[in-house]
Amino acid sequence: MNKQYKQIGDEVWKNRVEKINAELFTLTYGSVVAQLVKDYEDYQEVNKQLEKMGYNIGVRLIEDFLARASLGRCADFRETAEVISKIGFKIFLNITPTVTNWSSNNKEFSLIFEENPLAEFVELPDDGAADELWYSNILCGVLRGSLEMVQMQVEANFISDVLRGDDQTEMRVKLVKYLEEEVPAGED
Amino acid sequence: MSDIKIQSIAIIGKQNNPLYIKNFSVFHPDLKYHYIAHTSCDVIDERVGAAGPEAADTYLGLLYAMEDLDVYGYVTNTRVKFVVVLSVTNPVKNTVMKNLFKKIHNVYINQVCNPFYNLDGKKSIVSKRFVAAIDAIGITPSDDDVSP
């Protein structure tokens, strides 16, 4: 099953994805974060804004993803995690974060990022950013937004980041609930 | 292995403002290298003026020599200057110096790509990673070829 996902991811990345220059992408994201920091001057607020931006990206990105990868529904949350890691991240960032640390009820997992193209060359400023800013927080929003569009409500947040001096960059993803189709109020 | 000994590395911005000066020598005080970097600015401006407007990343070679110290210069396209002071026993090959400047340039480029680094600021560079990289270059210069 896993090998299949990896192959699908590799194949889509190779053939059906247009590429852009990596430095341009990194510098663009860097200037977005730097500008947010300058505008809000409060790192918690910057984290929130990055997450919101990510949410807006995610709700749109999921359509692109489903069109490129033409997959069916995932059987369970474990499959969702594999698809996110081996196909989702592969198609859009050409990385495959490792899925680990499943909780006992299979509703939470961690993504470990060995490389993070968003954070190339970045060094956090000394003024407390290292304790408060999650530089790649936009990714949490992207996951939340895209999974909401496929009827899953999740919470995603970083718990460690090499930019902050931690050993690895790790994001925790929790499934809150499956969203049922809501019957519009007028019908019975 | 070459027998050059780097005494100091200085990086000077385009308005001749010092961005970073590091003294590796145990014999001379820091201030001496500040003076040297300062006088190097004038020599560089002279040489660059003579070279004309078409200059690319320019390795300027030996700017001047004094007592037991040789001063080498390098100017980038963006008019950022690198000045390296050596104490040498034998004449140093150009290729060795060019490689050295290329390495320093790469470290500088990595620093500039940090979105939180303010390029227009008059302040010196304080990033730990930059300082560590320059230290590494200063302490063990080697003859490896460097890719950009």
Image (tube, grey):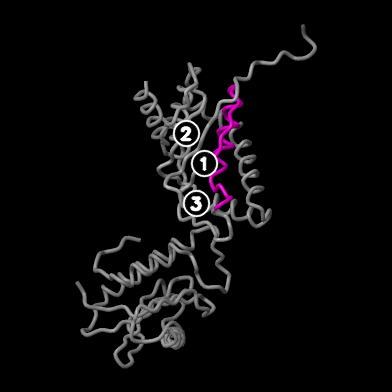
- Residue lying at 64% horizontally and 16% vertically, measured from the top left: A180
Residue A146, magenta (yes or no): yes
- Residue lying at 22% horizontally and 85% vertically, measured from the top left: B89
Residue ID for mark 2: A110
Q: CA distance from mark 2 to mark 1?
A: 9 Å
Are labels 1 and 3 assigned to the same chain? yes
Residue ID for mark 1: A159
* Label 2 chain ID: A
Q: Residue B80 location, x and y as percent?
A: 47, 74
Amino acid under disc 2: Ser
Residue numbers of the magenta segment: A131-157
* Image position of B11 with respect to A70: above or below: below
Query: Is residue B43 something one can see in this rendering?
Result: no
The answer to which of marks 2 and 1 sits earlier in the sequence is 2
Q: Residue A98 location, x and y as percent?
A: 41, 34
Are labels 2 and 3 assigned to the same chain? yes
The image quadrant that residue B47 belongs to is bottom left
Horizontal side of A25 relative to B73 (left or right) equals right
The image quadrant that residue A184 belongs to is top right
Residue ID for mark 3: A164
The answer to which of marks 1 and 3 sits earlier in the sequence is 1
Q: Residue B93 location, x and y as percent?
A: 24, 78
* Label 1 chain ID: A
SS at mark 2 in the image: strand
Circles 2 and 1, Cβ within 8 Å, touching? The answer is yes
Residue nearer the viewer, A51 or B110: A51
Residue at the extreme right of the image, as rendered: A186
Amino acid under disc 3: Arg
